[in-house]
Amino acid sequence: MAKLSTRPGISTLAIHAGQEPDPTTGAVMTPIYQTSTYAQEALGKNKGFEYARTHNATRAALERNLAGLEGAKHGLSFASGLAATNALIQTLSAGDHVVCGQNTYGGTYRLFERVLRKYQLDFTYVDTSKLGDIRRAITPSTKMLFLETPTNPVLRLTDLSGACEIAHDHNVVVVVDNTFASPYVQRPIGFGADIIIHSTTKFLNGHSDSVGGIVVAVRDDHIEWLRFVQNAEGAILGPMDAWLVLRGTKTLPLRMDRHNASALVLAEFLAGHPKVTRVHYPGLTNHPQHDLARRQMRGFGGLISFELGSLERARALLNNVSLMALAESLGGVETLISHPATMTHASVPPDRRLEIGLTDDMVRVSVGIEDVDDLKDDLTQALDHI
Ligand SMILES: Cc1ncc(COP(=O)(O)O)c(C=O)c1O
């Protein structure tokens, strides 16, 4: 009998999707197959495993799990989120054009502009929260729409159904970087997306102890080519990291509920604080796309950004938090605070930063799962130093 019903809930999927007791021992948790090769029974006869760049059972269990969580057909994991993005771009050919959100992750922008342009790929960056801007940017060479929603760090949303409809009318493949939301908060395939990528480094792993990436897809031609690229280019996720992410996804729904709830409490607290000039959080009723967030997301995510009026005031806050760690990255159980302009987005030119509303006084918080009152106390005492 199949272990999962036809429509399992997401918490059940998180624990069981793609997971079977280990065939050798019955181990309930997938073992870490830390091996580079496999003994063959006879020439041309093996158990389906020949060499670990091509096949690894721990990695395969994670790929099935993440495909299940995103409602996709198959997943392929890579050494980092950027390696995953680079792999999915290999579905394109020289001369192809990509329409991309203007507020995409800085490392993605750097990959597109500094590396992939050398291979005659063309990129146009638009404000994808405006569907008309997406439509106008599509040319006869456009083959891919690359979206991030919510964006980092200004937390603007893209209407996924609307964007997919426009793209598909022009035979353009829709890719969503779903790192910021996680499949618990948002499942873009349900809105029509074709390919999803994640930096598993973030919410999926959730414990800030591994770097990795995943691409999940629904179309057989994409899956086949991505599988080929994973082996041909070789930027695979190692078995230990695959196991760590698999351990992480089991508690994803529980963690995301807490991230969502605490972020909303802190966003409301910051919005009412006299030293904070502006708060960006889709869960606030004055967020310009709050209604879209309610339609498209389950909760509003664990990231908040806010403005303090000047770089000096932002610096005073960042240098005085004590429970929160001043660090890049996001999505872990612990709360991290950062200064996007000089940290995560330092590779984005200043004029582009201003264009997307990323000001020098902006601070970003990745809200962890500590007691929210302790987080509020930490922000309160740090704000007192301004
Ligand atoms: C939205 C987003 N996409 C992709 C990446 C790249 O992931 P990685 O650092 O695992 O290469 C990041 C990293 O911060 C990210 O925030």
Image: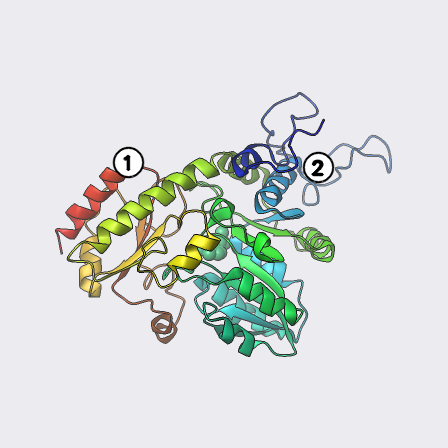
- Residue 169 badge: none
Considering the image in quadrants, where does the N terminus appear? top right
Q: Is residue 53 visible?
A: yes
Q: Secondary structure at mark 1?
A: loop
Considering the image in quadrants, where does the C terminus appear? bottom left
- Residue 371 badge: 1
Indicate the position of residue 216 as horizontal and vertical percent values. Answer: 62, 51
Indicate the position of residue 42 as horizontal and vertical percent values. Answer: 86, 32
Quick one: 301 or 31, which is closer to the camera?
301
**Measuring 65% from the left and 72% from the top, which residue is drawn there?**
170
User: What residue is disc 2 on?
Assistant: 37
What's the CA distance linking mark 1 and mark 2?
A: 45 Å
Under mark 2, the amino acid is Thr
Please give left or right for residue 170 compared with residue 342 in the image.
right
- Dot 1 alpha-carbon crowd within 10 angstroms: few under 14, some 14 to 19, many 20 or more: few
Report the residue that reaches farthest toward the right.
43
Quick one: 149 or 8, which is closer to the camera?
8
Indicate the position of residue 343 as horizontal and vertical percent values. Answer: 34, 59
Under mark 1, the amino acid is Asp
**Measuring 31% from the left and 37% from the top, which residue is drawn there?**
370
Q: Is residue 144 visible?
A: no
